[in-house]
Amino acid sequence: MYRYDQFDARIVRERVAQFRGQVARRLSGELLEDEFKPLRLQNGVYLQLHAYMLRIAIPYGQLSPVQLRRLAEIARDYDRGFGHFTTRQNIQFNWVALKDIPDVLEKLAEVEMHAIQTSGNCIRNTTTDHFAGAAQDEVLDPRAWCEIIRQWSTFHPEFAFLPRKFKIAVTAAEHDRAAIRVHDVGLHIRRKDGQVGFEVHVGGGQGRTPHIAALVNPFVPEAQILDYLEAIMRVYNRYGRRDNKYKARIKILVSELGEAEYIRQVEEEFAAQRPGEKINLPASEVARIHAYFAPPDLAPKPAVSKTLEAAKAADPAFARWTRVNLHPHKVAGFVTVTVSLKPIGAAPGDATGTQMDVVADLAEKYGYGDIRVSHAQNLILPHVALDDLPAVYAALDAAGLGAANESRITDMIVCPGLDYCNLANARSIPVALAVQKVFADPAYEEDIGKLHINVSGCINACGHHHVGHIGILGVDKKGEEFYQILLGGRADEKAALGEIVGPGLKADDVPAAIHRVVEFYRAERASPAEKFIDTLERLGHQRFQEALYAAG
Amino acid sequence: MPLVRGGAEIANDCIFVPDGGALPQSGRFSVSFGRYLSLKQGRENGPLPDGIRLAPADDPAQLEPFLPEIALIEVDFPRYTDGRGFSQAQLLRRRYGYSGEIRAVGHVLRDQIFYMHRSGIDAYETRRAGLFEVLEALAEFTEAYQPAVSGPAAIFRKRDGA
């Protein structure tokens, strides 16, 4: 993984010192809250319902064991013992005192971490495929380019006060696990005639007006991608709407201009760049950063492990976990492990400090020191030998991390909702937990197969309800919480927005309604291999909708 | 309001005359870009101003032909959240080669001055920050990742040279 050199380290240290000064000026009253707000936001500090919330950047979702242990320490020393992993591959602490935040940032800087640009109207943490570097279907490891984009976007002097926040996602695999089409900018790294380049998508997003991104350029050569991003950012900074916060995202600029005119403006700005404006990142720097992401030295092993097979035969729960939570690896005899943070009955994406320590230890012992956070709010051990899976599972299970539900119905993406967030209209975690309960039998859940349920407590869509195969959206109607159900969304390479199927349901009615839809799918699927989303596409929404409302 | 330029606090000798306001008979003054064009093109009679005040929506490209005769461009930040002035300054310096003074006016916060400096703004009319605060803000970061108009050289160039 990337390691700071003296330059990176100095920038982060100077940032901590700067923020310490800003907090001191705020606490002394020299800075008004209104003036402090953009400063704290660009350091990941939000004012939430109960307290300040600190969001820490996990660049492209990668952590070392040392970093994860430091997060565990912060959870214990400054929070209530746990942290919340987010859909942007970051972590949030909900109970940190403002006066302590400079100290927390200093502790993060010691392990090459920060909270820079995790909030505010600037370029946020660049996210990517959580299987990067291990997946069989990638053309190269996208993390190097994510790091290049991280450095380019960090304290960019021109783009720190954009009309609205700005999120970039990168994939290098045909199967899009980074949801690039619902990001402000989605980059798909491709190879063409021996050259590396980027397919550029712009203007995707969720929130109250969801959009699938427009394809703006099919292939920008790697040597030009930062200049091309500068053109995208400058057009947005100059012409994005600033009169209405809800129309300020780049998706609105793209849709109001129309794709063709938007593309023309970006290409015009790109063509207008003079030689002195070009970034000209030296090839040596690109190579330097790529070198940090060299794959671990994995000697191929037999594709079948006797140790593993014996353990599976002895323990059906373990056998199920290996069927559900593993993903194929580039190297024979290795797999990628998903550590589910969605056990039945717990807030999705939460992990205790103790659990973080367990995962850090496993990564160190069995996982080549590599840990990822997925946008589905789980942790990933990208490189684990088949022989080591029984030991890994045993330790995870003992720590309450043994749920076998990756990409299954109880592996929901859920926003914090009304319990924590001052934007929310409705609770989301309790509803998600009630739905989880219906599908808590692991054998039943495994039979249902892959099915994404995403839950948001308001139209800002932090729970990605637009792109869940089944989406649940909490709304407030005259003081009462209702839940609208959406069908047919997906965030992968066939990205689509779910459609609201009909009138909202009361919280108590949601679990049974979802259960009816799932049972309808099980009855109608062509074979157990046909996924929910495929059956839905084949049959259309109408009959699923009837099942949803068929209360009796 | 304090005006800081070239490492010193100086007296502001340039007054901004709003559209429709009477032009002064003596002393330095600035006007909007639209009014500058009126004066320049003879639609309005009067002395040419020393400076032009750019509104956030003004396009620096349209200023290009006049840049050699303009001593001062004021980039207006009506609200600190409006970052269009950073792009205007970058364009003026890096695309159109403007070498006169670019002065930030309006809601200029101490904590934006480092970015302003890097974008090519070299004078700051602040609301509350005085010379000490401005100099402190300019020195907060000794490194930067991107090429820019001024301030530290991009880190990748230093790495490449190392």
Image (tube, coloured by chain):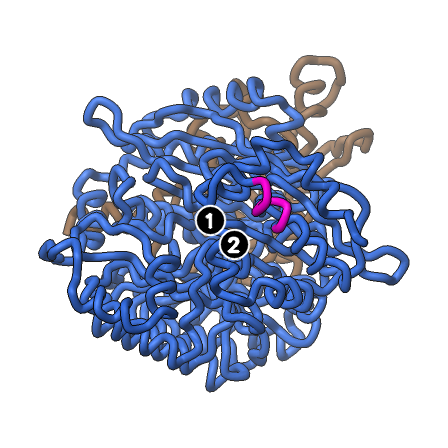
Residue B133's disc number: none
Crowding at mark 2 (Cα within 10 Å: few <14, some 14-19, many 20+): many
- Position in image of residue A344 (x %, y %): 54, 70
Q: Which residue appears farthest toward the right when viewing the image?
A: A478
**Marks 2/1: CA–CA distance:** 6 Å
Are discs 2 and 1 both within one chain? yes
- Position in image of residue A282 (x %, y %): 21, 39
Instruction: Judge by depth and name the residue closer to the eye, A34 or B89.
Output: A34
Find disc 1 in the rendering and name its residue.
B117
Indicate the amino acid at tag 2.
Ile
Q: Chain of mark 2?
A: B
Asked if marks 2 and 1 touch (Cβ < 8 Å), the reply is yes
What quarter of the picture does the C terminus of chain A occupy?
bottom right
Specify start and end residues of the magenta stretch as a single range: A519-524
Instruction: Judge by depth and name the residue closer to the eye, A100 or A383.
Output: A383
Q: Is residue A297 above or below residue A77?
A: above
Q: Is residue A232 above or below residue A384?
A: above
Indicate the amino acid at tag 1.
His
Question: Can you tell which chain is drawn brown?
Answer: B
Q: Main secondary structure of the magenta part?
A: helix
Q: Is residue B135 left or right of residue A474?
A: left
What quarter of the picture does the N terminus of chain A occupy?
bottom left
Question: Can you tell which chain is drawn blue?
Answer: A
Instruction: Judge by depth and name the residue closer to the eye, A275 or A536.
Output: A536
**Residue visible at 54% across and 61% down?**
A410
**Residue visible at 53% across and 45% down?**
A166
Residue B113's disc number: 2
- Position in image of residue A265 (x %, y %): 53, 22
| A419 inside magenta stretch | no
